[in-house]
Image (cartoon, rainbow, N blue to C red):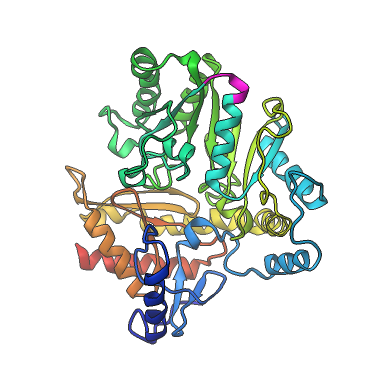
Amino acid sequence: MLPKLITALPGPKARAIIERDDQVISPSYTRSYPLVAERGEGAMVEDPDGNRFLDFAAGIAVVATGHCHPQVVKAIQEQAAKLIHMSGTDFYYENMVALAEKLASLVSAGGSPRRVYFGNSGTEAIEAAIKLTRYQSGRDQFVAFVGAFHGRTMGSLALTASKSTQQKGFFPVMPGAHHMPYAYCYRCPYGKEPDSCAVECVTAIETELFRTSVAPQDVAAIFVEPIQGEGGYVVPPRKFFDELRRLADRHGILLVADEVQSGMGRTGKMFASEHFGLQPDVMALAKGIASGLPLGAMVARAELMNWPPGAHASTFGGNPVAVAASLATIELLEQELVDNAARVGAHLMGRLRDLPQRFSIVGDVRGLGLMIGIELVRDQATKERAGDLRDRAVQMCFERGLLVLGAGPNTIRLCPPLVITKDQADFAAQTIEECLRLLG
């Protein structure tokens, strides 16, 4: 199924909803273009005026199995008819145990045993990781990276460094967070080639941060996205993680992988960490974990999760209906969708890889699986960012029936549902190429 537009955008019914929204919804929400969603199926979304769009945003990388996958819908309906809520922090129910067993086995992958904490979102998974690593280590400092997005609650916000507007007006946030350059090798802050850049970015933690600002024995954890999401879909080389793991081990620092956006099959493996041979001490999961129902998880080495009852909990975390959706989601991921993300992602990257050679406003194309970024620049030689062109490209895609979002200052983000077909990938590539041609 492909897009079909039958009215001007937004149509009259969509405009009426937007006008109502303007009166009652917090203006802190970011809306890139006036899409009003009424129903969804697979990778398609329809608005109340009957316009049909190809969704390459997936609810911000959330609906991994597509909109309203029949198996997920069935699991939700059956669970809702049986038990909607009981609170797993005070009582027991079997499907929460089953999901924890599944996640623990997926994350451990032959390594040390894992335990699972359930919350409702990515930022809650990060908050849990902050508290656990502080509790376990007895330390109170953290290292994160420039361009990182770890959430908007006050602890995770301290680790976030992707847009100043996310912190403006909210200081002081949690103290003790220190940011260092990420291995953004297209824009290496040290002027190095990719492998050297990756080493420099880790070496600088030792030679700059630990020498001047914080002693390593005070650092509880390093938080890192295996692929930076809001920072611009930045894919570092494996050597970055090899060196980071060595640094953490040398100083007894815990390593937390934020897989909220990059996990659950998006990159063509269950977790992006697998591409880099990274075995974190703690992993944060959310977004695609339950196909749109609110669920987050922190998965940690079992020996680390030695905190006592009452140390941390969530009334709604691990809700039975969300858990049922997650179990159905993981089954679909393992049966077909992780492989489809790898296969269709490779096909799509094949269509997009040479964009810098064909369009002077494209500086870089990068990604793994169905997590792909297209960075727009004013000039390929200077790499001057072209955020205005990116914003126009996003709007132009919407006007042609393709839903995409921005990431970072100037990158187009492609994160479609993992059910997309090669025909849909071709439509997306063709639409993006048309927009770039008009812009360039």
Vertical order, 89 against 247 (above or below): below
Nearer to me, 286 or 233: 286
Vertical order, 168 against 311 (above or below): below
Question: Is residue 279 in view?
Answer: no
Left or right relative to 100: residue 373: left
Residue 313 found in image quarter = top right
**Which image quadrant: the C terminus?**
bottom left
Identified at 28% across, 28% down, the residue is 192
- Give percent across and percent down for residue 272: 54, 42
Residue extent of the magenta highlight: 135-139
Question: Is residue 187 in view?
Answer: yes
Left or right relative to 211: residue 302: right
- Give percent across and percent down for residue 332: 68, 59
Left or right relative to 76: residue 420: left
Magenta segment: does it hold 7?
Answer: no
Q: Is the stretch drawn in magenta largely helix, strand or loop?
A: helix
Nearer to me, 33 or 53: 33
Magenta segment: does it hold 136?
Answer: yes
Vertical order, 1 against 381 (above or below): below
Nearer to me, 329 or 151: 151
Identified at 29% across, 49% down, the residue is 409
- Give percent across and percent down for residue 436: 26, 63
- Give percent across and percent down for residue 126: 54, 39
Residue 434 found in image quarter = bottom left
